[in-house]
Amino acid sequence: MGIFSRLVKPAVSDQFDYEGELAVVIGKEGRHIPASRALQHVAGYSCYNEGSVRQRHTSQFLAGKTFAGTGAFGPWLVTADEIPDPSRLTLENATETGSWCNTPRQIS
């Protein structure tokens, strides 16, 4: 979905939650990547408006985050060389302000 598209609340729930996220676009494949080399695998970053159905979250957190129409990506992809340390970014949107978790650890 595009950045200005409206998120679609899944019919299975009245509890639809949303938040701004940093989208990390992987550009180089790998396996068992040490955190110290993880950012070498990143092609770039973008904004992601993520919607989820919280009561569908179980031990597998993706279960509530994979409904069609519940995420908007963009509008730009910023290449990794323009953001050498994503942990220094701050996201601001209409509902919240926050900082990022450990991106290299999530990739590794």
Image: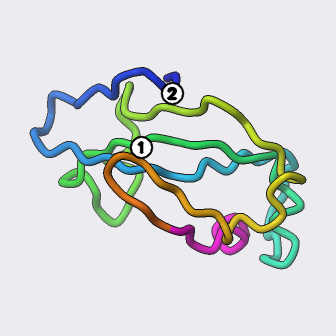
Residue mark closest to the camera, 1 vs 2: 2
Q: Position of residue 63 (x, y in %)?
A: 35, 48
The answer to whether the residues at label 1 and label 2 have Cβ atoms under 8 Å apart is: no
Q: Position of residue 101 (x, y in %)?
A: 56, 72
User: Which residue is painted at 89% across and 53% down in the image?
Assistant: 81
Q: Is residue 1 magenta?
A: no
Query: Which residue corresponds to mark 1?
Result: 50
Amino acid at circle 1: Glu
35 vs 89: above or below: below
Q: CA distance from mark 1 to mark 2?
A: 11 Å
State the quadrant of the C terminus. Answer: bottom right
Is residue 106 toward the left or the right of residue 36 in the image? left
What are the residue bounds of the magenta stretch?
99-108
Is residue 92 toward the left or the right of residue 83 in the image? left
User: Which residue is painted at 63% across and 74% down in the image?
Assistant: 102
Of the image marks 1 and 2, the number of the one nearer the N terminus? 2
Q: Mark 1 Cα within 10 Å, few/some/many (few <14, many 20+)?
A: many
Compare residues 66 and 46 and report the one nearer the observer.
Answer: 46
Q: Mark 2 Cα within 10 Å, few/some/many (few <14, many 20+)?
A: some
Query: Which residue corresponds to mark 2?
Result: 3
View extreme (left): residue: 14
Q: Is residue 107 magenta?
A: yes
Q: Position of residue 99 (x, y in %)?
A: 53, 68
